[in-house]
Amino acid sequence: MSAERPPEERVIDLGVELGPVRLPNPVLVASGTFGYGNEAVDLTRVRALGGIVTKTVTLEPRSGNAAPRLHETPSGMINSIGLQNVGIERFIAVKLPELLALGVPIIVSIGGRRVEEFQEVARRLEETSGIAALEINVSCPNVKEGGLEFCQNPASAAAVIEGVRQVTRLALWAKLSPNTSSIGTLARACEEAGADGLTAVNTFVALAVDIHSRAPIIPSGTGGLSGPAIRPIALAKAREVVRHTKLPVIGVGGIASAADALEFLIIGARAVQVGTASFPRPWLAAEVVDGIGRFLREEGETTLAELIGSYRDPRA
């Protein structure tokens, strides 16, 4: 009988299934925080990731909001990019082939002002091959039309999901906003409309003021707060989504280390996204993958399934 392998040699399976989507590990990069995903490949160690979520792509190219569009805050950042992107035609012709060549699962984030725009973007992506899923951005607070309505109104968000479901067989992840009275209700509405997964959460509406000019630092007024400052709130919101739906949940919000990611997995998220923390450390998401593997070895576990949902809920 052979001796048991020492912990450092134990084979760890980090694979995870999110409905019809299987990822090699649970760590993705969040939309809008990693470029399109194929920039600086060696620096980011992108091929070590569980998947890439692209910048949000819209029907037509968008130049985004006026600068300044980023403002650093204590342990966080306010952004108001306004969904700047090259548009679906150029994305399919130029960006997507380069992404697919990386050999990493690609999740394309899509946005629009109206349901019909979401549908047309999804329809064009349906005609391509190799995409793992679509992340439906019904949660962006930084656009003039559609953003807040889709964020806050479960019926409006559900209408987008239902409309996209009609034109594609691709897996659909609904990206949820925390800027709503009940994220659990929003999650259930998206589930009933045909979503295959839920990304929780997007940024929190925030404001910063220049005390000398008495005007907002971000020209559009408010923006979206992200970074470590929001993690405990995002974690609570993600837990609420887990409790209110049977769909797989992808946790996001302030993750800056493997320990942060483990918190989301323990409360029941099946995958996580690293966002703002990639700005100062573009390789961080890959380090999170490594850290999760080390933790499982130290705990004597061999699969991620043993960890996911192991939260000891005092209310249970």
Image: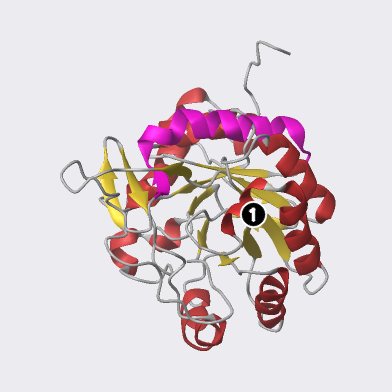
Quadrant (top left/top right/bottom left/bottom right) for the C terminus: top right
Q: Residue at x 15, y 44 (%)?
A: 212
- Helix, strand or loop at label 1? It is helix
Residues drawn in magenta: 222-246
Position of residue 186 relative to residue 116, above or below, is above
* Residue 257 % position (x, y): 37, 37
Q: Is 241 part of what is drawn in magenta?
A: yes
* Residue 66 % position (x, y): 33, 67
Q: Amino acid at mark 1?
A: Glu
Q: Residue at x 28, y 65 (%)?
A: 67
Q: Residue at x 56, y 28 (%)?
A: 236
Relative placement, left or right, of 305 versus 49 is: right
Q: Is 175 part of what is drawn in magenta?
A: no
The prevailing secondary structure element of the residues shown in magenta is helix
Report the residue that reaches farthest toward the top. Answer: 314
- Residue at mark 1: 149
